[in-house]
Image (cartoon, grey):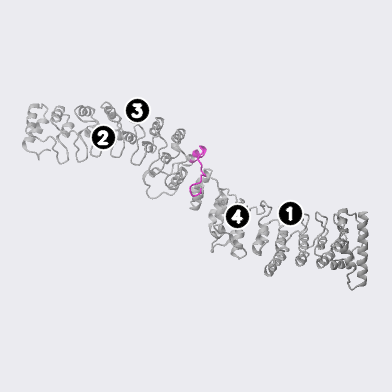
Amino acid sequence: MFGFFKINEDLFYKELLSDTIDINKIQKYINKGINLNKRDERGKTILFTLVAKKKFEAIKVLVKNGADLTIEDNFRKTVLDDAINRTDGVMIRFLLDNGYSINHKNSVGRTVFQDVAFVGNYKIFQIFMNYNADFNQKDNYGKTVLFDAVEGGSLLILKDVINNCNTLNILDENHQTVLFKAVLKDDISLATELVLHGINVNFLDKDGQNVLFNTILHGSKNIPLIELLIKKGTNLNVVDNFNKNIIDELLYISALQKDPPKELEGKYKLVTAEKEYMPIAQLFIDQGIEIDKIDSEGKTTLQREVEKKNFSNIEFLLDCGADVNICNEFEKNLIHQEILKGYSNFRMIDFLMAHGANIDARDFDERSVVDDIVEIIAVIKGFKTATPYLSALIKDDEKYDVLLKKVLTFRPDIQTQRLDGSNILFDMVLYNDFETLKTIINYGINLNIKDKRGCTPLMFMVEEGIKIKDKKQRDIFIERLIYFLKYRVNIDAKDNDGRTVIHKAVIANDLLVVEKLLTKKADLSIRDIHGRTALHHTQWHGNYKIARWLIAAGADMNLPDNSGFTLLNYAAVFGHLRLIIALIASGVLMYNKNPKNRKVAQFFKDRESKLDKLLTTSVGDDKMELAIKELVENLKNEINEVLQ
């Protein structure tokens, strides 16, 4: 072994290894300058051999004369390391008693005390406990023996370290306490011991994560430990430097579990197919974690996973109780947003609907997803101008008519009314998309639903249509009216003032609209809240042509209003000569025997000059002039009778 040394060195080593060692002789060799720390080809000094052979006296004399007990061989091992490997308690104590410092750092900055804790050798560790080991000494990575005790996995060693170190909250190079490592161990007793002795459970590492992000990796097996951490005040709502919370981390782990890469890295190597993570998620929910917490971008975890079309994560979140109907800033829920991405997104649409999405939800503007689809179709066909919101969503390659039919298969309630009582049908009667209108009507929408004013979609169409001045737009309106009247619309429906759509057209003095409305059989005896039929309202403009149409359709000319006066009475006092002639020619009664309102009678009395003017107007027909004279005399007498 030592053949490469000089002859006097061989004799020296031979003497050292002798069973009857001559100390004086050894000392003489030393005095002559023998190098006590000379190493062989393995980097070992003579001390390694002496320790192995338990030559205590030889070791003593060498150490006394300067032999270095801490020299490391080519494998960075010292004589004490060798003694430890052989579990030689006697030699370990001897070396420690004869100059080897328990707190000596080796070439990599670690003490033998830490190494023993690292391998979990409690028998040797007990020996070291008697030699004033420094429990707070740090290695080159800032770690104390506490970290090694956890890595070694010996609960007994960990307890001794906990009882002797100054603090449990030492941070390593990753700004992690030893608890971050302890929760990764199969044996939860290590982490439990640390938590029960007060280690800080809310430290954030360099990634902004707390210890929970590690604890969940072992799945449901770690639930008792998680419950303990929660009891000790661990923050469940930490968001790390990557804008991920603990639920996001569970999602990532779940994704790794279902579709693992060829080789997992780092702590994620702990993720295995048999581990269960859903119970952990449910525990977090039960403990009040905000699964629908909105991040800095205004989105929940579920919304982000839906955007990424990560179906497994979406299902995981929904199983954990995430709100499938969470809304964006416009109060449009998830299914609303996903449907507007087009028919090509049918898989996500079907998935969300199968998991309880509310297709009838309304946004801030009280609009449903069907409302938006119909409007998009109208925009594409050129009937409407897109809002900024819809403009950003419309795609040229999407078939929105097919999308509408797809959505209708989910049986949405398209009759739901807004605060003003209107619904989608009120929107659609303002432009001529007959194909889409037919789809909505065939779906079964109520054509005669009323808004808060009591108006039906037909009334609303007519109200807006009669305001149109542009000839081209008016022609389009008339075309729309004719088309809509083909369906079972009720033209006898009354608004809150008791007026039908024909009332409204007559009041607007729109003959063409009246003509089109009368293509449907109408009850022309319907009176409004003032007791006036549609025919009564020809009094305002004196439109005799409209009057003729109504009379021809069966309107009763002789009905009085609530004040007791007939249309003929009003036509006379307003001086509508042509209307008077049309009524007389149609056989109207020339007298009015109905009880009359005194105030209205006074109104007529104050306008007798209008009646007198009728008598001075020539109509070119003697019989008609006599009839008008009779009308004026009768009306004056009737007024005077009321006012007497």
Residue 454 numbered tag? 1
Comes first in the chain, label 1 or label 2? 2
Name the residue beneath numbered marker 4: 369
Q: Nearer the viewer, residue 267 or 455?
A: 455
Would you identify the image quadrant in which residue 164 lies? Answer: top left
Residue 602 image position (x, y, % from top left): 87, 56
Disc 1 and disc 2: Cα gap in Å? 90 Å
Would you identify the image quadrant in which residue 638 lies? Answer: bottom right
Comes first in the chain, label 4 or label 1? 4
Residue 231 image position (x, y, % from top left): 46, 33
Is the residue marked by circle 4 packed among few (<14), some (14-19), or many (20+) residues within 10 Å? many
Residue 167 image position (x, y, % from top left): 35, 31
Q: Is residue 154 above or below residue 307?
A: above
The amino acid at mark 1 is Gly
Residue 111 numbered tag? 2
The amino acid at mark 3 is Asn
Q: For numbered disc 1, what is the local secondary structure?
A: loop
Single out the mark in the foreground, 4 or 1.
1
511 to the left or right of 320: right
The amino acid at mark 4 is Val
Q: Nearer the viewer, residue 488 or 595?
A: 595
- Is the Cβ of the residue at disc 3 closer than 8 Å to that at disc 1? no
Question: Residue 238: in sight, yes or no?
Answer: yes
Q: For numbered disc 4, what is the local secondary structure?
A: helix
Name the residue beneath numbered marker 3: 163
Would you identify the image quadrant in which residue 117 lies? Answer: top left
Disc 4 and disc 1: Cα gap in Å? 25 Å
Comes first in the chain, label 2 or label 3? 2
